[in-house]
């Protein structure tokens, strides 16, 4: 039995350590790329074989006892061992249909990011590649952890490398130090509140535990009973951490600065994966562990989500900097993810007895999770495209471009594809998640859904008007006569993402099938309201 | 059992699209060959299904060809399953769409070659630099139109619908960018194409957002989007079991039906979202024929046909859903016709005529004349494609769209002239061309009362509809006559353009001839003498909902037929009196310009672009209307709000923390330190710690987190013990 999850998580760590001892830049780059493919292969194999795992064989090893065995029945590749037994902290890993696609996407974007960076990063190479691998450890750790202490640990580990990536390799004109500190402090402020929530959960559960599977509603204990105040406060702690990470309006202002300042691969990971830690938390922690409080606050969270969608897309429309525009587009798109959460959370106890409502709640969760995956693919692609254009023109001002559709047609085609995927054209990845989120949202938060749906028009407007028109359309300018089209390595970086945009858009079932199994479990927890 | 291969019908042109994009895009000839092969294969298969459907006869509407093998997306215990669904009207579409598409594909192989004069004065024909790209796009478009026709699920339908919207965007904006070596387009054209493509996509998207809302609400209230399951009366009744009304005085079925109809308003360019279609004429002419006349805009009508049981259900449960459809259609039919009168661009006249004719179809569907509306959809596709391709041949020959630079062209291009004439007479509704049979039927049903029993008040409603349609028919004949006289008759107003004019090459006139043949004979498919189309599509009604109307040759029908032809004839004679009797000279303005403010109003399209649209000028500049400027204002305000308030507060918090740290440091070193050394040292620690916190020293941040958490943990512990 292979402990897939431990391997996937810690192989990059080992890689980061090895990088420190390698002699020259070329070897470091080649090693890091090849090394990062190992977790990608492992994640692919794990995901492909996941459905063949059935209880009670879903543990690779379990030294934590039968209670964990029962509570973790919906997870595969389980690994559990006591770590700090005095306070019940365990090394508990597991994956299900919710985390597996995200794990896979993380390993994929890490490989692509390293591959692209090998060509464009030439200063302090050793540090860059070591930190980039370390970053992967933090993100993967969050997705595989089933113990809240472990979850928190990995959550914080991810911050440090990203802080340095922005601060050191950021563009000088974008105030990288300011952006890095803002990113770090803002996220840290959120995670401190989460730590409070974690401690509260520990203290109020009997027996005291950090285990997420045991804490989930309907398992061995209900942490807070009828204590509304404490459970709301603990909920709020998690909620703040997650919504800063997402980011949700009004906690989003670190994002445009950090995304704009970060080096290309850093922006890709930041948008592609790091934001999803927040979204993942919504569905892994808030819904199963706090179904009642989630239900109480669902409407107001939905309001923030809808503001994010509409506000984010209108502010994106006002941007003149390509990279900042893409950054703001994430605010709008993540709004859909939170709207999906709010829509599912809003299901009342009465509605939870009606199969139609349960199904539309499932659509909301499925849609939100798929929206995270497709946003990772699409926005990852967009940031690569921003970086590739910057490498050529040394500007990101949209007003400087024009006529590139004729000048660099391959770039044009890929930008057209990615932009339309992002604005939610059916047949491409962005649409499926958006539609299913709206399906769920109309069922429980009808009015909010009807406001949020207009974000789709605004999103289309800024992509057509600002991105495609300013960059690709118009007559070619004499200044850009010698602009070269995409090179082989750039096409190779974008190709997997482009293929995914089509495959997810045309046959989303291969991902949704996984997600749906996890969603059904989450809905079972929610029935315990 | 050809029907089991129905899914291959859209798959084959899609495959052609993929092959062109990935493999053959460097070779123009090969790309065109791949595209035509794809559409021919789809056509053969479609005809197979069509013939099989015909052999089933009217039974088909009770037991349509159906299969939904593709599990697309699961949610909870349910999933969206996609497949195919062919009922009689769908089968008729399977005959029309690939036929018209194939003609347009063949025509395009010649149209997308431009004549070009080299430095020695020799004429050359060379391919458009984006020849292969053009065939890729129209293949994708054809694939999606066919997918839409065979969709078994409303969501599948919507996906095809939206991808067609993308194709439309890409093809309207086909010349929206220009490389340095592309001399056949100029900057003004680039500017117009750019603005027009965005306008088209965003305007239709407004309709699509409402359509999506309608689809989701339908899904939530009836529980499925599958065409075979959704229209079960018991399932439809679920919509009524919802305890609350969505809006005061409006039931769910009415709201949902009208939201879905909003999609049609966008896609089929009905008032008030019609503003994009005339500007869409910036695309290459075959595109105008393909997308903006024959097929894509008819997708909007087909949506109404597909959701017809919903409309009638909404009507029967007490709403006025169908009246809304009828009134929007009839109003647009008249309204667009008036604007078509004041256009100088040969394609824009046809664009307004398309909007107007789509209005006729909707008016028919709205008054319950299901068969008449459906039949007009089919016949219109043929003759409008014919007219557009004919106009394209003229443009190709004289190098301008402006009818005031044409004149007398019938001598130069007789085949184009004859076929265009046939199309124009079908549009006007002259016996015995196909347009006569379908349009006359609509007017007749308006007179007879359509599907609705005559109730109090409804008579006046139908009379108003009839009146609008009849006046619309008169204006149709007027603007079509104007177009013919200005283009083909009189003296050439631009001798240079006239000199270089020539008959279209065979690849262009052959499709015209085929379409003209269909235009002449197709009407007999549903003539009152032998209404085969009615027996096929309408006799058992739609999904067994009962017959809608009777096509029969009686006294009213005869007198109405004379009336219709009379209206068309008087319109055509009026056109002759104004534009034909004394032909317009070069430099002379339009004789109707004497109408003054009314003419100004018509030629400015009622100033709607200035109000909520996007006005695109001939020189390539564009000016947003009031509504768009309002959105721009909101956008700029929010951007200010973002920087000044939202981010301002964050920075203020940071600044305040730093200030506090400095203050603390000052207090520490100047006051505390001097007074109590022991306390001072502790505070000094904290102050230093606060300072470093602002410099980004990571280890310290971690310390803050852990220490703070520990402190609070102790608080919690204490609380739980007490």
Image (cartoon, rainbow, N blue to C red):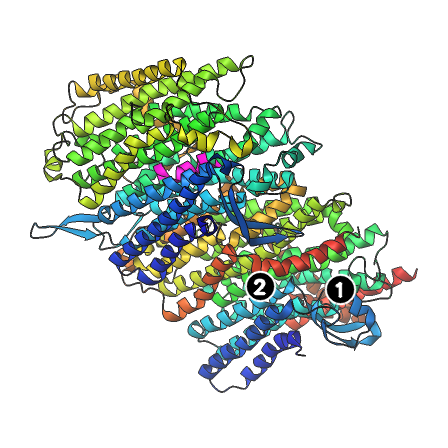
In the displayed structure image, the side of residue B653 where residue B412 appears, left or right: left
- Magenta stretch? B292-303
For the question of whether residue A332 can be seen, the reply is no
Residue closer to the observer: A439 or B52: B52
Quarter of image, res B336: top left
Q: Chain of mark 1?
A: A
Marks 1 and 2, how far apart at CA:
22 Å
Q: Which mark is residue B217?
A: none
Task: Please name the residue shown 82% across and 71% down the image.
Answer: A66
Q: Is residue A477 above or below residue B536?
A: below
In the displayed structure image, the side of residue A436 where residue B595 appears, left or right: left
**Secondary structure mostly taken by the magenta-highlighted segment of the chain:** helix
In which quadrant is the C terminus of chain B drawn?
bottom right
Q: Is residue B706 above or below residue B501?
A: below
Is B172 part of what is drawn in magenta?
no
Question: Which residue in the structure is indicated by mark 2?
Answer: A273
């Amino acid at each position: 039995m292979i402990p897939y999850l431990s391997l996937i998580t810690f192989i990059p760590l080992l890689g980061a350590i090895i990088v420190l001892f390698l002699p020259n830049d070329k070897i470091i780059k080649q090693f890091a790329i090849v090394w990062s493919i190992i977790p990608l292969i492992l994640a692919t194999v794990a995901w492909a074989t996941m459905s063949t795992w059935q209880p009670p064989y879903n543990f690779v090893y379990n030294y934590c006892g039968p209670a964990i065995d029962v509570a973790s029945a919906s997870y595969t590749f389980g690994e559990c061992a006591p770590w700090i037994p005095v306070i019940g902290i365990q090394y508990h890993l597991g994956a299900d249909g919710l985390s597996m696609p995200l794990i896979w996407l993380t390993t994929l974007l890490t490989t692509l990011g390293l591959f692209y960076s090998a060509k464009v990063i030439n200063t302090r190479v050793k540090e860059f590649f070591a930190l980039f691998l370390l970053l992967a450890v933090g993100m993967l750790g969050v997705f595989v952890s089933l113990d809240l202490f472990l979850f928190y640990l990995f959550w914080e580990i991810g911050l440090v490398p990203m802080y340095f990536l922005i601060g050191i390799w950021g563009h000088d004109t974008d105030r990288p130090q300011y952006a890095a500190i803002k990113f770090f402090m803002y996220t840290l402020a959120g995670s401190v509140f989460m730590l409070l929530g974690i401690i509260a959960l520990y203290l109020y559960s009997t027996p005291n535990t950090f285990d997420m599977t045991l804490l989930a509603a309907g398992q061995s204990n209900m942490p807070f009973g009828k204590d509304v105040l404490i459970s709301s406060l603990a909920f709020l702690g998690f909620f703040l951490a997650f919504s800063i990470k997402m980011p949700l309006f009004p906690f989003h202002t670190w994002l445009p600065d950090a995304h704009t300042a970060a080096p290309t691969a850093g922006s890709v990971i930041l948008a592609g994966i790091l934001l999803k830690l927040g979204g993942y938390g919504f569905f892994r922690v808030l819904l199963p562990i706090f179904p009642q409080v989630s239900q109480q606050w669902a409407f107001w969270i939905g309001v923030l989500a809808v503001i994010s969608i509409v506000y984010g897309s209108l502010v994106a429309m006002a941007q003149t900097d390509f990279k900042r525009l893409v950054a703001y587009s994430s605010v709008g798109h993540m709004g859909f993810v939170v709207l999906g959460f709010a829509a599912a959370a809003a299901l009342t106890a009465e509605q939870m007895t009606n199969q139609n409502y349960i199904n539309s709640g499932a659509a909301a969760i499925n849609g939100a999770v798929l929206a995270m995956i497709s946003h990772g693919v699409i926005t990852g692609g967009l940031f690569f495209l921003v970086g590739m254009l910057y490498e050529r023109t040394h500007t990101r001002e949209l007003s400087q471009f024009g006529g590139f559709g004729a000048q660099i047609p391959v770039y044009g085609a890929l930008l057209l594809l990615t932009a339309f995927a992002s604005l939610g054209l059916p047949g491409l990845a962005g649409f499926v998640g958006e539609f299913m989120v709206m399906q769920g949202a109309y069922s429980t938060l009808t009015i909010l859904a009807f406001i949020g749906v207009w974000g789709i028009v605004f999103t289309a407007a800024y992509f057509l008007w600002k991105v495609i028109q300013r960059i690709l359309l118009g007559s070619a300018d004499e200044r850009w006569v010698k602009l070269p089209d995409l090179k082989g390595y750039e096409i190779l970086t974008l190709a997997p993402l482009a293929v995914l945009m089509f495959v997810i858009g045309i046959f989303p079932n291969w991902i949704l099938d996984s997600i749906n199994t996890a969603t059904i479990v989450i809905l079972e927890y929610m029935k315990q309201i | 059992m050809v029907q089991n291969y129905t899914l291959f019908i859209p798959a084959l042109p899609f495959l052609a699209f993929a092959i062109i994009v990935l493999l053959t895009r460097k070779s123009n000839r090969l790309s065109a060959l791949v595209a035509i092969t794809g559409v021919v294969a789809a056509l053969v298969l479609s005809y197979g299904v069509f013939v099989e459907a015909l052999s089933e006869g009217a039974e088909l509407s009770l037991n349509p060809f159906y299969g939904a093998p593709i599990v697309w997306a699961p949610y909870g215990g349910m999933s969206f399953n996609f497949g195919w669904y062919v009922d009689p009207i769908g089968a008729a579409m399977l005959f029309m769409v690939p036929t018209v598409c194939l003609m347009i594909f063949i025509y395009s192989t010649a149209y997308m070659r431009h004549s070009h004069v080299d430095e020695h004065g020799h004429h050359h024909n060379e391919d458009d630099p984006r020849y292969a790209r053009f065939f890729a796009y129209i293949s994708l478009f054809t694939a999606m139109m066919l997918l839409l026709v065979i969709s078994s699920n409303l969501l599948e339908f919507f996906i095809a619908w939206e991808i067609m919207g993308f194709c439309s965007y890409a093809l309207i904006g086909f010349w929206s960018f220009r490389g340095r070596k592309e001399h056949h387009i100029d900057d003004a054209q680039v500017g117009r194409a750019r603005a027009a493509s965005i306008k088209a996509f965003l305007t239709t998207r407004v309709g699509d957002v409402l359509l999506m809302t309608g689809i989701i609400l339908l899904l939530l209230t009836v529980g499925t989007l599958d065409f075979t399951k959704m229209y079960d009366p018991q399932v439809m009744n679920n919509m009524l079991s919802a305890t609350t009304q969505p809006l005061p005085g409006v039931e769910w079925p009415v709201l949902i039906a009208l939201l879905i109809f909003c999609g049609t308003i966008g896609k089929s360019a009905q008032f008030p979202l019609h503003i994009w279609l005339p500007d869409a004429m910036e695309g290459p002419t075959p595109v105008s024929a393909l997308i903006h006349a024959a097929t894509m805009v008819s997708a909007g009508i087909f949506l109404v046909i597909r959701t017809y049981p919903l409309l009638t259900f909404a009507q029967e449960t007490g709403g006025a859903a169908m009246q809304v459809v009828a009134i929007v259609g009839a109003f647009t039919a008249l309204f667009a016709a008036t604007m078509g009168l004041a256009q100088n661009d040969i394609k824009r006249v046809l664009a307004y005529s398309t909007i107007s004719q789509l209005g006729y179809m909707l008016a028919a569907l709205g008054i319950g004349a299901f068969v008449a509306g459906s039949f007009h959809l089919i016949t219109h596709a043929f003759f409008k494609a014919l007219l557009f391709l004919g106009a394209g041949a003229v443009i190709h020959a004289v190098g301008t769209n402006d009818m005031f630079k044409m004149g007398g062209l019938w001598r130069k291009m007789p085949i184009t002239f004859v076929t265009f004439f046939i199309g124009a007479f079908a549009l006007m509704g002259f016996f015995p061309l196909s347009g006569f049979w379908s349009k006359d039927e609509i007017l007749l049903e308006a007179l007879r009362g359509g599907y609705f029993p005559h109730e109090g008040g409804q008579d006046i409603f139908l009379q108003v509809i009839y009146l609008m349609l009849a006046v619309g028919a008169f204006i149709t004949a007027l603007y079509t006559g104007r177009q013919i006289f200005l283009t083909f008759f009189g003296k050439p107003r631009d001798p240079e353009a006239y000199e270089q004019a020539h008959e279209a090459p065979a690849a262009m006139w052959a499709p015209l001839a085929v379409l003209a043949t269909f235009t002449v004979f197709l009407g007999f498919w549903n003539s009152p003498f032998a209404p085969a189309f009615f027996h096929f599509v309408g006799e058992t009604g739609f999904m067994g909902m009962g017959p809608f109307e009777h096509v029969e040759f009686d006294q009213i029908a005869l007198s109405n037929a004379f009336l219709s032809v009379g209206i068309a004839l008087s319109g055509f004679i009026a056109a002759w009196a104004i534009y034909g009797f004394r032909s317009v000279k070069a430099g002379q303005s339009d004789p109707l310009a004497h109408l003054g403010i009314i003419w100004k109003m018509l030629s400015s399209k009622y100033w709607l672009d200035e109000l909520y649209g996007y006005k695109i000028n001939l020189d390539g500049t564009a000016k947003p209307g009031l509504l768009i400027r309002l959105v721009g204002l909101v956008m700029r305000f929010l951007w200010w709000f973002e920087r000044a308030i939202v981010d301002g507060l964050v920075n203020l918090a940071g600044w305040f923390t730093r200030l506090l740290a400095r203050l603390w440091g000052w207090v520490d070193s100047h006051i505390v330190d001097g007074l109590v050394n022991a306390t001072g040292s502790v505070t000094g620690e904290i102050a230093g710690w606060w300072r470093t916190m602002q410099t980004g020293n990571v280890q310290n941040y971690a310390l803050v987190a852990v220490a703070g958490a520990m402190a609070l943990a102790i608080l919690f512990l204490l609380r739980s013990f007490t």
